Image (cartoon, rainbow, N blue to C red):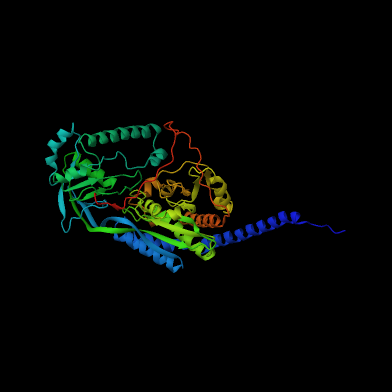
Amino acid sequence: MKCKLNSLTLVPAIVLMLSSGLVQAQNAVVDQIVKEGSENSQLQKLAHELIDGVGPRLVGTPQMLKANEWAVAKYKSWGVTARNEKWGEWRGWERGISHLDMVYPRVKSLEGTQLAWSPGMGDKTVTAEMVILPDLADSAAFQKWLPIVKGKFIMISMAQPTGRPDDNWQQYATKASFESMKTDRTAQTDAWRKRITKTGFNARTLPVALENAGAAGIITSNWSAGFGVDKIFSAYTKKVPTVDIALEDYGLLYRLTESGVKPRISVHTESKELGVVPTFNTIAEIKGKQKPDEYVMLSAHFDSWDGGTGATDNGTGTLTMMEAMRILKKIYPNPKRTILVGHWGSEEQGLNGSRAFVEDHPEIVKNLQALFNQDNGTGRVVNIGGQGYAKASEYITRWLAAVPSNIRDSIKTNFPGVPGAGGSDFASFVAVGAPGFSLSSLGWSYGNYTWHTNRDTYDKIVFDDVRNNAILTAILVYMACEDPQRTSTERAPLGNNPRTGQPMVWPVQVKATRRGGLDQ
């Protein structure tokens, strides 16, 4: 006896077969992505070309423009459409050579770096005594003291009581010794902060007051709490150099000055002012075939500070996105949705490149399926939050399910999470209610040793972790492209801030600074 199957009986079976076939097809693409990323990685070559070859990428410098042009050429070599899109203008500046030496009471070459946008000295070399910013009663007393600075190098940073990072103390010191050091350091830090306040100026305005009084230069030491590491930010002087001297040498000069030896240093720094220059985001695209007006984005800021070479902030994020795009173009050349990557300019001065993109491209932002941003160092991704979107867990969990377990199992998720108000470029998209997500990575001593420091260099890259991140990103982008559903941007209730007890609010859009650096 033959069994008859009506059409209603066949429908579930057909759906199951189609669903199974889709999963198998997706698994095959994921396997190819993993294979390409693992066996044919271009990360070390890309890192050498960008980090060693182009170097640091301070907004407004020739190196930043060179990086933009390098990225476009690299994408085009892979068959990916790319362009540099102007978003604003910035003060043009180029770092030159620096020579710093103590010449009395003995000769010693000093480790130091002129700060970004420090004025150049031309062909001059200045040799002068050191003076420590004194602890005076008030701003009136400071004004009376101020004529003393003429022709001298002024030290305006606290001398650290130890050059050992805290983890070194924890490993070797007695508990009492460690606690005593921390207590003394806190008191010293508070006292120095008050010392600056009593001048009537702040960290930004004090150097200008000193240069206007005739100082030969400003000497700082912005220790990053690790062996041999300083943060290198921007100068506020316009006529005389501002130089950061490493903790070890700064401490030596400070103690000699404090004891009355009157050390003398010789300083020669060069830089060029280049006027107002255009600034760009680098945008690359793989056009979607079925839904070309819906978008999945990769995101990483391209600029850096320039004390080092910007290897982990954000060279590794940049490399992750470039490698993921290379893999996708090779394995998934005909995506369902359009894939875009944004390499943003001037993130370090306030997310300016990505904020400008959000302002300039509402048609992309409103049709964004998802954006994945990476920007906290070389470590493998270990956390993805929902950024306050009520249903983010549904689609992100679905996409993560396709990721191999050796990558996926170390990732913690936090849903719905809290919307990011800053920190990196995904926040520019979250502020307007677009689904931007941060791929947050392991620290690898990022805060102390590489974030904005003179030691953020190629040798700090952990390529195994970056390789994992590129594979992860490529798979997430592929799954987001293929997902038959549009992502929901329904906002979850945010509740109260645990620190203040006040209701949390969704971050608001902040306009990009389109013309910057001119007041530095």
Whether 139 is drawn above or below 266: the answer is above
Residue 20 falls in image quadrant: bottom right
In front of the other: 509 or 516: 509
Q: Would residue 343 be seen by someone viewing this image from the given angle?
A: yes
Q: Residue 279 placed where, x, y %?
A: 32, 58
Is 185 or 102 nearer to us in this picture?
185
**In screen coordinates, is 328 left or right of 211?**
right
Residue drawn at 12 percent across, 36 percent down: 144
Q: Residue 403's image quarter?
A: bottom right
Nearest the viewer among 98 and 387 is: 387
352 sits left or right of 470 in the view: left
Number of numbered discs overlaid on the protein picture: 0
When the figure is inspected, residue 107 is found, relative to residue 36, above or below; the finding is: above
Residue 168 x %, y %: 39, 41
Residue 456 spot, x, y in % from top left:
36, 53
Horizontal and vertical percent position of residue 457: 37, 55
Q: Is residue 225 left or right of residue 390?
A: left
Q: Confirm whether residue 71 shows in the render.
A: no
Residue drawn at the location 44% of the way across and 65% of the way down: 81
Q: Quadrant of the N terminus?
A: bottom right
Q: Is residue 403 above or below residue 165?
A: below
Closest to the observer, 203 or 69: 69
